[in-house]
Image (cartoon, grey):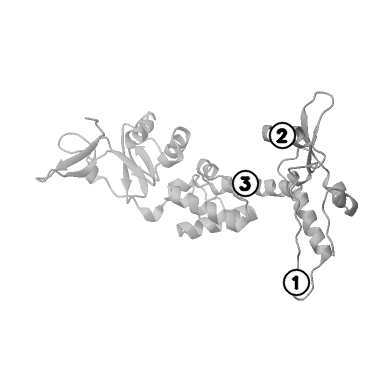
Amino acid sequence: FYRTGDLVTMDNNGLLHYQGRKDHQIKLHGQRIELGEIERCLLNITSISACVVMKWNNDHLVAYIQSSHTNEHELREHCQSHLPPHMIPSFFIILEKLPLNPNGKIDRKLLPPPNFSSIHLTNNIELLPPTNDMEVSIHRIWCEIFKLNQISIDTNIFTIGGHSLLIMQLFHRYKIEFHLEINTLSISNLFQHPTIIHHAQLIQQSINIIHTLDDYPWSTLHIVLARASFAQERIYLDEQIRFSSNKTMMKNMYVIPLLYRISSMKNDISITRLHHAFQSVITKHNILRTVLYINDTNGNIIQHCLDANIILNDDHMKSYGFTVVN
């Protein structure tokens, strides 16, 4: 049998009923957490003689500390340096002595419940307000989602009940609020940098990327001259071998001739606008301006993307087979 660490009971019908975990492993906000790992991390602080970490209300991790020479700021800072964000307790309750049962073990049932009304909204002693328009907007979104009036901009989202679903909710709110493109902001980055300050920096970087891309043509591939792909070489050579010697055949077998007749009931078709539409499509798609030829120096087949500004005047459009007839 594989020992999973789950505690179960078996009824008279042979059905297993889950009772809990033997090793205090929990699942919080979609993340599996070994509470003993957090406890071992805290016990590395010499002033702590005993500690226990528990899950409360399925939303928060609470660490009970037995010590008289430490404070919450020190504990939180230590955890932030040694644990991932989702394993940092939301509350640190410092007691002079943890309650024990008759067997001398920590009695978890006698531990005092945390005061959720005093949830920590900041990682520092003072609450830091937003300092710019971006942080103000993100702060407003956080307050709406968490239903809080104030959140410090250095607050770790996981210490106030944040989880993976809320991160995804923030991600979609950011895209709508700041008009972000799909690939400019990463959910994983929001996880790794879970404060308002960091989110503001990430969103500003995404906006800068969008503005940078706007300075370039629509195409994402700015290659004008390159060796042809294997598929292009096959098509080119196939055309040269099979059809170039036959004078009765068309010279370019892979150029598809198309003739469209466009009509309008009101006869209000604008030839100028239609011409501009063709120009926009040709400018956007490099492949429509790409020609293949053999390099005389090394015999390689080269693909050359023609300059849109040259090919799109009337004379060049006609020479390349683009004609608008009124």
- Does the image show residue 95? no
As drawn, is 126 to the left or to the right of 163?
Answer: right
Judging by the rendered image, the residue that carries numbered circle 1 is 264
As drawn, is 105 to the left or to the right of 214?
Answer: left
Circle 3 residues within 10 Å: few <14, some 14–19, many ≥20: some
Q: CA distance from mark 2 to mark 1?
A: 42 Å
What residue type is disc 2 on? Asp
Residue drawn at 77 percent across, 50 percent down: 282
Q: CA distance from mark 3 to mark 1?
A: 42 Å
Foreground mark, 2 or 1, reads 2
What residue type is disc 1 on? Ser
Circle 1 residues within 10 Å: few <14, some 14–19, many ≥20: few
Q: Nearer the viewer, residue 322 or 45?
A: 322
Of the residues under marks 2 and 3, which one precedes in the sequence? Answer: 3
The quarter of the image holding the N terminus is top left
Residue drawn at 44 percent across, 46 percent down: 158
Q: What number is the disc on residue 16? A: none
Residue drawn at 66 percent across, 49 percent down: 207
As drawn, is 33 to the left or to the right of 152?
Answer: left
Q: CA distance from mark 2 to mark 3?
A: 41 Å
The quarter of the image holding the C terminus is bottom right
- Does the image show residue 28? yes
Residue 130 at x, y percent in the picture: 59, 53
Judging by the rendered image, the residue that carries numbered circle 2 is 238
Circle 2 residues within 10 Å: few <14, some 14–19, many ≥20: few
Tags 3 and 1 touching, CB below 8 Å: no
Residue 135 at x, y percent in the picture: 60, 53
Q: Nearer the viewer, residue 263 or 62?
A: 263
Mark 2 lies on a secondary structure that is helix
Mark 1 lies on a secondary structure that is loop
Judging by the rendered image, the residue that carries numbered circle 3 is 184
Mark 3 lies on a secondary structure that is helix
